[in-house]
Each structure stands twice: as C-alpha cells, then as structure tokens.
Amino acid sequence: MLTNDIYLQLLQIVGDKKITRDAAELSYWGKDSTQFSANASAIIFPQNIEQLQAIVQLVNREGVALVPSAGRTGLSGGAVAIQGEVVVSLRDMNAIKQFNAIDRTVVCEAGVITADLQAFAEQQGLYYPVDFASSGSSLIGGNISTNAGGIKVLKYGMTRQWVAGLKVVTGAGDILDMNKSLLKNNTGYDIQQLFIGAEGTLGFVAEATMRLTRPPEHLTVLLLAVPHLTALLQVLAHFQVGMELTAFEFFSEQALQKVTAQLGLQRPCSEVGAYYTLIEFEAKDDMVIERAMSLFEQCLEQGIALDGVISQNQAQYQNLWRLREEISSVLAQWQPLKHDLSVPPSQQGEFLLEVEKILSELAPQYQVIWYGHIGDGNVHLNILKPDELTKAEFDHSCKAISVAIFERLATYNGSVSAEHGIGLLKKDYLHYSRSELEIALMKGIKQQLDPKGLMNPGKIF
C-alpha cells in the first residue's frame, strides 16, 4: 500500500513534478490499449537508471508493487495497474547515447520511441528493421519487454534478434549489465534473454544496446487479390521459392472495406478477392521486378490470384501499406475480441480452415476480421462487438469461442500470443502453449529475480 510517507520518499528520489497522484494522470498512465480500467496509486517518472534502482530498492523495503509503463500501446493488458500499484513511466529516460559505426550498434535508454531509433539509424546510413503500426508511440523498453514483432519478421526476426546488450534493474533492486555488444559469448546461461519478453515481471529494462543493419534497397510492394484462404498459402509458396521477401502480409475483404470506408482510401484492385496479400521485396534491379511479375503471372494462370498492383513510387508504396497497417486502429471502434495466434507456417492452411469452422459453428452472429503476418505464421483474428451488447456481455459470450480455438491451437503446438504478450488478457490460456513444467520453471525464475513479487504482479501467471 502506498502511504503518504512512502510517497514522500519517492518524491525525494525523483523530485517535484516527476511523481503525481492526479486522477486524470492515473487513468492515462495506468493502462495500455486494452479495455482494462486503471487503478494506480501514483505515477512516477525516473530520469535515469540510478533513480529507477532507488525506486525499486525503496518499494522492496516497503512492499509496494510497481507496474512499468512504456508507450502504452500493448494489447494484452501487460502494462495496466489494477491493484493500486505505482506506475513507473520510462518516458523521460529517452536518450540515444553511444553509436558505434564498426559494430553497427547504438545505446538507447528504455524511453526512446521506436520511430526515433529508426530515424537515427537512417541518419547513420543504417536501418533498424523492427517495425509496426505503433512505431511512432511505442518505446524501445516496451518493445524489448514484449519481444515485439511486426511487419518485417519474415526477413529480420523479432526484437530479441536486435538486442546486443541490456542493462536492467531486477526486482530485487540490482543492476545487471549484460552481454555488452558481443556477437559471440558462450559463457553459460544467457540471462539477458530472460528479460526480453518478460513483460516487466522480472524487473525493468533501463538501457539497451541495439543492433542496426544495412538499409534495404528500393522496397517495393506487390498487392494481390486472391480468391480464398488456401490461395494465400499457395501464393506464399510461389514467392518464397522464387525470391527473397522482406514481408508477406494478408487481410480480408471485410478488413479492406472497413479501412477504405473509414479513411477514404482507394481500393487497390479492380477485382474483389476474399483476401489480399501484400508482398514486399527489395527491387535492387529490373531483374527482380521481372521475376516478381513472372511469379504474379503464374499465380494468375493457376487461379490463385485474381488481380494485382505493384507500387511505382514511394507514395504508392506507402498507400498500399496503409491498407494493412491502419486495420487495427480502424477496428478499435468496435472493441473487438483479439486473438494473436501462431502455428508453423506449413500448417497455417489447415489450422485456419479449422478455426473458420469453429467460428461458423459458435459465432455465426458476429462479424470476423482476419489480417496479419501470414508469412511468419502469425495471424490476427478480430471478432467485432455488436452495438447492442455491452463489452462485458460480449466478452462473456466469446469465452467458449476462445477456449475452442485454443484447444485446437494446442493440437498444432501453436502460440496463444505470437507477439502481443500474455499480460492480464491471456494468462488464463497460457497452459495451451506452455507445459506445467515450463510454467513452474518460469515462476521459479521470477522468484529468483523478483523475490517479493513486486514487479508487475498478476501478469503472465
């Protein structure tokens, strides 16, 4: 419990105006992009790792729980304070520090905005490839804590592939400075990896050394209309064999209708498909374009594509990507039930058809929107809430649907959360993707690094 005495001690650590109990601030900083309501007792804004460590050490002595807050863009309730916790916002720890041109690394504090890191890399003639719709507001610390993925995982992988070093404050108040930019480091357990994707339950990410890479050359998008779900996987097989891709995304006709109507965007194709696939690649020379068009022609001849359009310039490239990237924000008005599912790419076709059958049996009255990163096995299922139902009524009615989907998912050894994390939203379903032994081991790790259970309590488990 946060007493006045503890509040004053926290104020002494960070100074005036860097801690507040204002009701509007508590509501704003105490939640993420989910529908969970905030119940925070205070919001504190440390300026550096020393203040962050002092905060954690103080609450360890006093028994006050902490919740991390980054860009508040999470979709699983992982950054929501619901039990009177103190929210620790990393907003002000936002310095981009050392850049090493030889190692292609840059040191960032946890509060650096993803888009700012991308812009910094571009200024150095390099590239930070982890990208998603919320890159303009998400923070690097949050990306690391959730192992964020996004639209270019097919080529570049998840956030953890780009972390060269990590400095954290553990739940016990110790500072760990790990890996320190080494490419090769076989010296026992890789403790750094435990904090990537841990959702702040082991401690707080304070600083990260991030890897950069060469910028892609002449990124180009080919968008195809396809007639049915299995055609998506057939198109993927054609293009993956025929050329190197940086992204392979998809969305349904229903998703396209919502986005074009809401944002006034033009439809990309004259033919209407059941689904659309957005294929991105580096058009380094004319031969690559010719190869892409040849594969497109093959898909047309085989009936697995109905129509297509290729970007001719940067404006067209960005407009085609908007059709995919704006879906989540457009759908938010319907307060959808979201599922962030993944199975091995080779099994996607069979799995998705089974999920479609489940939905037709259990949820024929609801509108369902599909989109996602089908190239890496990750699909986003959105069931839209009807206006006549309250959010509580809708969520309750969807529980049986969720269980049926996760039970089927487990037979494919899939993940109930491909990239959004577990948080509050999915902790009841963790056992569909993790064994009892795995969960017990994770709890044991948390006990070692957060012995008093004060770091983001109630999340994951």
Image (cartoon, rainbow, N blue to C red):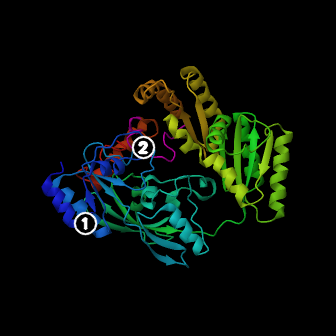
Residue 392 x/y as whole percent: 40, 28
Where in the figure is residue 412, as x and y percent of width and height?
Answer: 56, 36
Q: Where is residue 418 in the image (x, y as percent from the top left)?
A: 52, 45
Q: Which residue is drawn at 49% across and 67% down?
A: 210
Which amino acid type corresponds to the residue marked 2 in the rendered image? Ile
Task: Residue at 44% x, 45% y: name it.
Answer: 33
- Disc 1: CA contacts within 10 A as few (<14), some (14-19) or many (>=20): some
Q: Was residue 420 drawn as part of the magenta stretch in this picture?
A: yes
360 vs 151: above or below: above
Of the residues shown, which amino acid type is indicated by label 1?
A: Val
Cα distance between the residues tagged 1 and 2: 31 Å
Up/down of 258 relative to 313, above or below: above
Check disc 2 and report the residue beneath it: 422
SS class of the residue under badge 2?
Answer: loop
Residue placed under numbered mark 1 in the picture: 14
Q: Residue 299 carries which label?
A: none
Instruction: State the quadrant of the C terminus.
Output: top left
Q: Is residue 406 above or below residue 151?
A: above
**Relative image position of residue 361 (x, y in whole percent):** 57, 20
User: For residue 386: magenta?
Assistant: no
User: Can residue 456 be seen here?
Assistant: no
- Asked if 422 appears above or below 183 in the picture, the reply is above
Residue 342, quarter of the rendered image:
top right
Q: Taking 420 as reference, is 23 left or right? A: left
> Camera-side residue: 151 or 72?
72
Q: With 293 as the anchor, is 391 left or right in this view?
A: left
In this image, 94 relative to 299: left or right? left
Q: In this picture, which residue range is highlighted in magenta?
A: 411-428
Q: Going from the N terminus, do you reach mark 1 or mark 2 first?
A: 1
Determine the secondary structure under disc 1.
helix
